[in-house]
Image (cartoon, grey):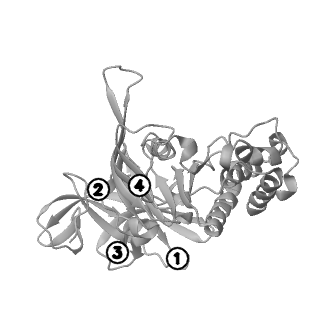
């Protein structure tokens, strides 16, 4: 099911100051295609969960519209929207078995929607098989691991065959290995069911690894939406560039002058734009050790972590961190004469931003 948000805005009265209005979601205006998995991404407090609550009907918008397909659902209560919701804390009933937890939404259907016990049992078993917990149906939540509890919550959301599945930070309570396994299962389930899914997370690696599209938010404002790799490769502003990537992008004070891009006195490339002070973002994978390279850094050390080798250097113009990290091949030969190491930079991995508004500048 396609989801369309038209100028969606949500404002709250501040808890700390009754006279202050907080805008949690500010003029969201975009379309989520049918059958896709969307990663809603941003730092804590940026409005991700509020957006999810608006879509499912737990919050009423201050202004704007929400459409599921061609149907305006802005005023519909949550139970009439055909939405499945999975919460961060799973929200399972501790006194019920897995089977009873999954069946619960179907047993509460009334009138023409009411199902027979046989149909309810069949659909519960199908949902359990989909998330691979059909052998655990008679256990209670406290007899399950965190990953198994999460799958029960997903099965319970899917048993109603919703048109939209909403996941609010579903992996945050799991350890690293289990997070990886569970996010892969979420992707598999989404592909098998074809349900339009919105996955809220502050973890950019999670969002980029399983999403068809990501939406990056900051302070209630949509910053950028697109395919994960495209957003990573073509950030529209400094915030998006810094938020995506691990290790993070290296940011330098720079200049555009005489049709060139400079970091300090090093002309790192040609750049056809008006002369100005800029921020220069250089991805860790952009660095190529090169004895004749234009960019000079002070060599510090080499760190090897499995297949990755990081050259750690310093440059007085770097403002993002004390250390500059360059990820290179383990076979790369390094020449750090007099403690200075030179690099060439891959043009596609270097991004230039205005110091005035931090938006990207194309040379």
Q: Secondary structure at mark 4?
A: strand
Label 4 vs label 3, nearer the camera: 4
Mark nearer the N terminus (1 vs 2): 2
Q: Which residue is mark 4?
A: 216
Q: Secondary structure at mark 3?
A: helix
Looking at the picture, does residue 240 appear above or below residue 266?
above
Which numbered disc covers residue 329? 1
For mark 1, does the 10 Å Cα neighbourhood hold few (<14), some (14 to 19), or many (20 or more) residues? few
For mark 3, does the 10 Å Cα neighbourhood hold few (<14), some (14 to 19), or many (20 or more) residues? few
Residue 344, how many percent across, how many down? 34, 76
Looking at the picture, does residue 141 appear above or below residue 263?
above
Contact (Cβ within 8 Å) of mark 3 with mark 2: no
* Residue at the (26%, 62%) spot, across then down: 360
Q: Secondary structure at mark 1?
A: loop
Mark nearer the N terminus (4 vs 1): 4
Label 3 vs label 2, nearer the camera: 3
Q: Which residue is mark 2?
A: 317
What's the CA distance linking mark 4 and mark 3? Answer: 21 Å
Q: Which residue is mark 3?
A: 348
What's the CA distance linking mark 3 and mark 2? Answer: 21 Å
């Amino acid at each position: 099911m396609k989801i369309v948000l038209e100028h969606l805005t949500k404002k709250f009265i501040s808890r700390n100051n009754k006279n202050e209005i907080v805008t949690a979601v500010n003029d969201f205006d975009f379309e989520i295609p049918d059958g896709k998995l969307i990663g809603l991404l941003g730092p804590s407090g940026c409005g991700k969960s509020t957006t999810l609550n608006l879509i499912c009907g737990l919050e009423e918008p201050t202004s704007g519209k929400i459409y599921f397909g061609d149907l305006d659902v802005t005023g519909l209560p949550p139970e009439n929207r055909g939405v499945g919701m999975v919460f961060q804390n799973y929200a399972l009933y501790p006194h019920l078995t897995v089977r009873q937890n999954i069946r619960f939404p179907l047993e509460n259907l009334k009138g023409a929607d009411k199902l027979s016990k046989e149909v309810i049992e069949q659909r519960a078993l199908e949902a359990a098989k989909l998330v691979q917990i059909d052998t655990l149906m008679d256990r209670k939540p406290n007899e399950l691991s965190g990953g198994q509890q999460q799958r029960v919550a997903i099965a319970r959301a899917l048993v109603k065959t919703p048109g939209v599945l909403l996941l609010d930070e579903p992996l945050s309570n799991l350890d690293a290995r289990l997070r990886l396994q569970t996010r892969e299962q979420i992707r598999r389930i989404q592909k098998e069911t074809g349900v339009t899914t919105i996955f809220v997370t502050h973890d950019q690696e999670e969002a980029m690894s399983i999403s068809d599209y990501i939406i990056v938010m900051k302070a209630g404002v949509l910053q950028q939406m697109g395919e994960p790799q495209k957003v990573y490769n073509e950030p529209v502003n400094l915030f998006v560039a810094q938020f995506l990537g691990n290790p993070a992008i290296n940011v330098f004070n720079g200049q555009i002058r005489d049709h060139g891009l400079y970091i300090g006195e090093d002309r790192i490339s040609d750049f056809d734009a008006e002369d100005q002070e800029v921020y220069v973002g250089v991805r860790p994978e952009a660095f190529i050790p090169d004895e004749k390279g234009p960019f000079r850094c002070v060599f510090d050390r080499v760190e090897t972590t499995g297949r990755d080798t990081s050259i750690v250097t310093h440059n007085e113009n770097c403002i993002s961190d004390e250390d500059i990290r360059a990820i290179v091949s383990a076979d790369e030969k390094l020449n750090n004469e007099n403690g200075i190491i030179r690099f060439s930079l891959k043009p596609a991995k270097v991004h230039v931003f205005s110091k005035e508004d931090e938006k990207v500048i194309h040379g």
